[in-house]
Every structure is written in structure tokens, then in C-alpha cells.
Image: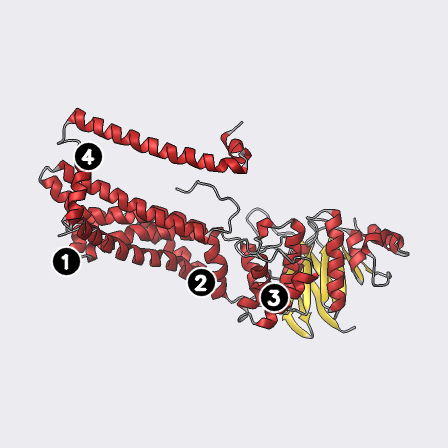
């Protein structure tokens, strides 16, 4: 599998402050790659620097050390002068908070990326309608975010990224704040959408079961400073039945191995 | 039970009776104020307190001979010109400063310090420069409006959720679109708060300006009545000024409701 994203020797520390020198490393010496069309999950304890890692890949934060190669081209390097958030729409980012614009209805939020990228045509509207259909938001197009449930907002945020079709999507615990049943539903939606159009996905979570249920491969991060503590291929064949993921052969063994790596 | 809980517990059907209570309360308060006014007139005599009825008759008379309309037109002309310029600058400058945090840091203390200049005291000097036309008054109005709008819009801009801005950048939005579609919309509640303070100020600044130099306008009429010891004329002018501010506020509230109709809470709580 050709590497879509290569992270090489990445390190991050925040700027020094008086009386707190030297600043601690958040991420240190991190190297991994993500294949084209791969769904990589990254598991780590809270506060391990998972969000910081994704922020650096999405280029809304700088790296202190190391480089990132995107599709064969060096995009993040130590001497970098300016950031390119989203790398010209080639990296989508579904954040932990849905970050929907509160004054826009569902449909206007979903169309927002297309609107700011030079206008909405009939094809764009058709695509948005198709995605709204795919995640079961039909009938809620004219609702404002505060009128939607948490799960619906997550779906809207997800399809807002899918609508402009970035080849790589970063997801930062997108389903952490919803109840277990809704989460299973969202995970199934995600896998269905992913099976239709194989994106490269980096999915960060603190939930080992979620990492196994979704991923082709799971990386385990250590506590601060975040390093890679383990790497596990997930041997469970697709399509997977998420609701009964526990009962599938191989689940217990892989769960145990990942557990052992997560401190 | 606190009053907030009480309001939240009201069933749908009683919202109407709540409205009636509020409107009724307002009418009762207005009547009480009128009565106090009438009592003041009787207690202190018409030189110190013009009676309400006489004041009302004077306004009707002014409306009849066209004086009311020319006064309002003159005052509104000055306030509108000053307001438009002050408002444009007050909104535009924070957006310009956003482009350079260093320039902001350098300039902001000067802007805030210049607030200390007593604006009405500038009028004689402005007359020296610009003559006795609308310009000196409009400039004073501009100064009042500018600071209020500048400060509220700047506060709103700082209050914009950085995560929404990052999200828009990742989605590929250029900075000028982020300014218009994320930051501007997000600071609208602050902007409207600024407007509600700035608009009445604009009208009063125009009126005070007219005390000093004018040949027509609400302020001119008040000042001339004062010179003639015509208390009724002074009161009539004040009532007209208050009415103007009320009408303008009503318009701003309407605009605000339209612009912020997406917001969850819709209660009769606007100022």
C-alpha cells in the first residue's frame, strides 16, 4: 500500500514561559505512516497529545521537530514559515466538538465548504442531499444546530467534511460525547460511507473497542510525551458487525494486546 | 422559586397573558410618570415644569406649522451622517487591525486614550475649521458613535470562537470570507449592543451640537425656547427627542430580531 501520509520524527513542545523552562515535550520522536485508503486508528489515554498530533497534521498548529510527507511531497518541516490549514482542502478534519456554525441550518452548514470554495451548483446540492440521506438527517435540513441532538450534530459535521471529498480525513474522538447506542450507529454510518469511497482516515480515540471496530490497524500512544507504544494490525474481516464486535473471533485477543500497551 | 424558574415553567397558553401583563405594566408606568409630571407642574409652576397637556398642544402646533418636520429632518440629517461615518469606521477598523496583530498593539492605546478627549468641547474648534454648517455637528456625532461601535465590535471579534475560524480555514475558506461569514456573523450580538448605545447617543450629540451652532433642528428649538424662558418649548423639544430615540430603538430591535432569529432564546428581554 502506497503511503498517503508519512510522519517522521515528529516532536512538539509549546513555547517556553517564564518559570517553566524548559517546556515539556507533548509529542516526541513519532514516526508512522498511513497507507492510501487505510483506516488507521490511534488509541491513547486522555491528555496524551492526540489532538495536538492531528492539529499538526491538519496544519493548524506547528511542529517543533520532524517532518510530514503528504502523498510524496514534504508539507511540514522544521523551517516552515507559514501554515496551510487543511492543505488546500486535501486534509479534512472532523474535530471533537462539531464546530457547526450555530447560525446556519444543517443544509447550510453542510454546503458551507462548497460555498466558500467558489459557489454551489446543482451537483453540489445533489451531493449534499445524498449525504444527508445517507446519515439519516432527512427532515432536519432546516434545523439549527441547537435544535439537533448530539448524534445528529456529529453526523452533520461528518458529512460537512465528506461533501468536499478530501482524500485524507482526520477524526478526533468524533463520537466521544454521545451515548453508547448512538455511537454504535455513528460508527456503522462511518464504515458504510468509508466502504463506498475509500478515504484515508486517521481516527483518534481513547476507546480500545472503537479502535478495533473501525481500524485496519491501530497505533497505541504512550502517556506524555506521546510516543508510539505499539502497533497492531486488526485481523477482523470486513464488513464488520459493530454491534456484536465483542463476539467476533479474534476480538478478545487483539483487545488484550492493545490493553497491554495502553498504560 | 426564583423568577427565572417561574418564567421557564409557564405553559404555552399563558404566554399571551404574560404579554398582556407586560404591556399593561408599561401603560401603568407611563401613566404614573405622566401623573408625576402633572404634579410637578402644579407644585412648581409652569416656569419650572411645563404641564404635560400644554407640552402636547405645543407639539401639535409645531406639527401644524411644519416646524416639527423641519426640526426633525435637520437633527436626523446630522445624526445620520455622523452615525453612518462613525459606524463604518467603528466596524471597519477592527477588521483592518485584525490583519496585523502588531499594528493593533501599537495603535490600540492611542485609540483608547483619544477617547478621553471631551467631544463637545471640540465643537468651537471644529466650527473654526468647518464653519457653521452640518460638518462640525456631524463630526461630534461621528466621534461618539465611533468609539462605542469600535469597542463593542473589537470585543465581539475577540470573542469569536477560534475553533470555528480554524474549521473554516481547514475547509478552504479564504480570510476575507472568514471575516464576513464567520467573524462578522458571530459578533453581531455585540454589534447590536453597540448600536443600541450608539444610536441614542448620536441623536443627543446632534441635539447638543445644535445648542451651540444651528439655524434649525430639535436642539436649536430647545435652545431658543430656553433663551426666551419658554419652558413649554424646552419640554416639547425633549419629548420630541425622546420619541425619536424610541422610534430608532424600535427599528434596531426589529433588525436585531431578524439578524439573530436563529438564537435559541426568544424572550421579551431586549433593551
Q: How far apart are marks 2 and 3 (CA)?
A: 21 Å
Q: Position of residue B42 (x, y in %)?
A: 17, 26
The foreground one among B210 and B266 is B266
Disc 1 element: loop
Q: Distance between the residues labelled 1 and 3?
A: 56 Å
Question: From this viewpoint, is residue B157 visible?
Answer: no
Which chain is home to disc 4?
B
Disc 4 element: helix
Question: Circle 2: is it few (<14), some (14-19), or many (20+) Cα within 10 Å?
Answer: few
Q: Earlier in the sequence, mark 1 or mark 4?
A: 4
Residue at 57%, 68% in the rendered image: A114
Residue at 58%, 56% in the rendered image: A100
Disc 3 element: helix
Colour convention of the picture: secondary structure
The residue singled out by tag 3 in the image is: A86
The residue singled out by tag 2 in the image is: B99
Q: Where is residue A175 in the image (x, y as percent from the top left)?
A: 70, 52
* Residues marked 4 and 3, same chain: no
The residue singled out by tag 4 in the image is: B53
Is label 1 or label 4 in front? 4
Q: Which of marks 1 and 2 is nearer the N terminus?
A: 2
The residue singled out by tag 1 in the image is: B131
Q: Distance between the residues labelled 4 and 2?
A: 57 Å
Which chain is home to disc 2?
B
Amino acid at each position: 500500500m502506497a503511503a498517503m501520509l508519512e510522519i517522521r520524527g515528529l516532536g512538539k513542545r509549546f513555547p517556553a514561559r517564564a518559570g517553566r523552562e524548559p517546556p515539556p515535550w507533548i509529542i516526541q520522536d513519532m514516526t508512522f505512516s498511513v497507507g492510501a485508503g487505510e483506516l488507521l486508528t490511534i488509541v491513547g489515554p486522555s491528555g496524551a497529545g492526540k489532538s495536538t498530533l492531528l492539529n499538526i497534521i491538519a496544519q493548524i498548529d506547528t511542529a517543533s521537530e520532524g517532518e510530514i510527507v503528504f502523498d510524496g511531497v514534504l508539507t511540514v518541516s522544521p523551517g516552515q514559515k507559514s501554515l496551510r490549514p487543511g492543505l488546500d482542502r486535501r486534509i479534512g478534519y472532523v474535530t471533537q466538538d462539531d464546530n457547526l456554525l450555530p447560525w446556519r441550518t444543517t443544509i447550510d452548514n453542510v454546503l458551507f465548504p462548497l460555498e466558500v470554495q467558489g459557489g454551489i451548483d446543482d451537483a453540489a446540492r445533489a451531493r449534499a442531499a445524498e449525504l444527508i440521506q445517507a446519515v439519516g438527517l432527512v427532515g432536519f435540513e432546516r434545523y439549527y444546530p441547537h435544535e439537533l441532538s448530539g448524534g445528529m450534530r456529529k453526523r452533520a459535521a461528518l458529512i460537512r467534511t465528506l461533501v468536499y471529498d478530501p482524500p485524507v480525513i482526520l477524526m478526533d474522538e468524533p463520537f466521544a460525547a454521545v451515548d453508547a447506542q448512538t455511537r454504535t450507529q455513528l460508527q456503522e454510518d462511518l464504515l458504510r460511507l468509508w466502504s463506498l469511497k475509500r478515504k484515508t482516515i486517521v481516527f483518534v480515540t481513547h476507546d480500545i473497542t472503537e479502535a478495533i471496530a473501525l481500524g485496519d490497524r491501530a497505533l497505541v500512544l504512550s502517556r506524555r510525551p506521546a510516543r508510539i507504544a505499539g502497533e497492531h494490525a486488526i485481523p477482523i474481516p470486513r464488513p464488520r458487525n459493530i454491534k456484536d464486535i465483542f463476539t467476533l473471533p479474534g476480538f478478545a485477543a487483539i483487545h488484550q494486546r492493545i490493553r497491554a500497551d495502553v498504560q | 422559586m426564583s423568577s427565572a424558574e417561574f418564567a421557564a415553567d409557564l405553559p404555552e397558553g399563558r404566554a399571551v397573558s404574560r404579554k398582556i401583563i407586560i404591556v399593561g405594566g408599561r401603560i401603568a408606568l407611563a401613566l404614573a410618570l405622566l401623573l408625576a409630571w402633572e404634579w410637578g407642574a402644579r407644585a412648581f409652576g409652569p416656569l419650572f415644569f411645563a404641564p404635560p397637556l400644554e407640552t402636547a398642544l405645543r407639539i401639535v402646533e409645531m406639527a401644524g406649522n411644519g416646524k416639527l418636520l423641519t426640526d426633525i429632518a435637520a437633527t436626523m440629517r446630522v445624526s445620520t451622517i455622523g452615525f453612518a461615518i462613525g459606524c463604518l469606521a467603528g466596524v471597519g477598523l477592527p477588521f483592518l487591525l485584525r490583519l496585523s496583530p502588531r499594528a493593533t498593539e501599537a495603535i490600540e492605546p492611542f485609540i483608547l486614550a483619544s477617547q478621553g478627549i471631551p467631544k463637545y468641547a471640540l465643537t468651537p474648534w471644529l466650527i473654526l475649521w468647518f464653519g457653521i454648517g452640518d460638518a462640525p455637528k456631524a463630526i461630534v456625532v461621528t466621534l461618539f458613535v465611533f468609539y462605542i461601535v469600535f469597542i463593542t465590535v473589537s470585543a465581539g471579534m475577540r470573542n469569536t470562537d477560534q475553533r470555528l475560524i480554524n474549521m473554516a480555514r481547514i475547509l478552504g475558506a479564504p480570510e476575507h470570507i472568514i471575516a464576513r461569514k464567520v467573524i462578522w456573523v458571530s459578533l453581531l450580538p455585540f454589534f447590536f449592543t453597540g448600536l443600541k448605545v450608539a444610536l441614542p447617543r448620536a441623536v443627543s450629540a446632534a441635539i447638543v451640537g445644535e445648542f451651540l451652532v444651528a439655524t434649525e433642528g430639535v436642539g436649536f428649538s430647545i435652545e431658543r425656547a430656553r433663551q426666551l424662558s419658554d419652558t413649554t418649548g424646552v419640554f416639547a423639544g425633549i419629548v420630541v427627542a425622546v420619541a425619536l430615540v424610541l422610534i430608532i430603538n424600535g427599528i434596531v430591535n426589529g433588525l436585531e430580531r431578524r439578524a439573530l432569529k436563529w438564537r435559541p432564546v426568544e424572550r421579551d428581554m431586549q433593551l
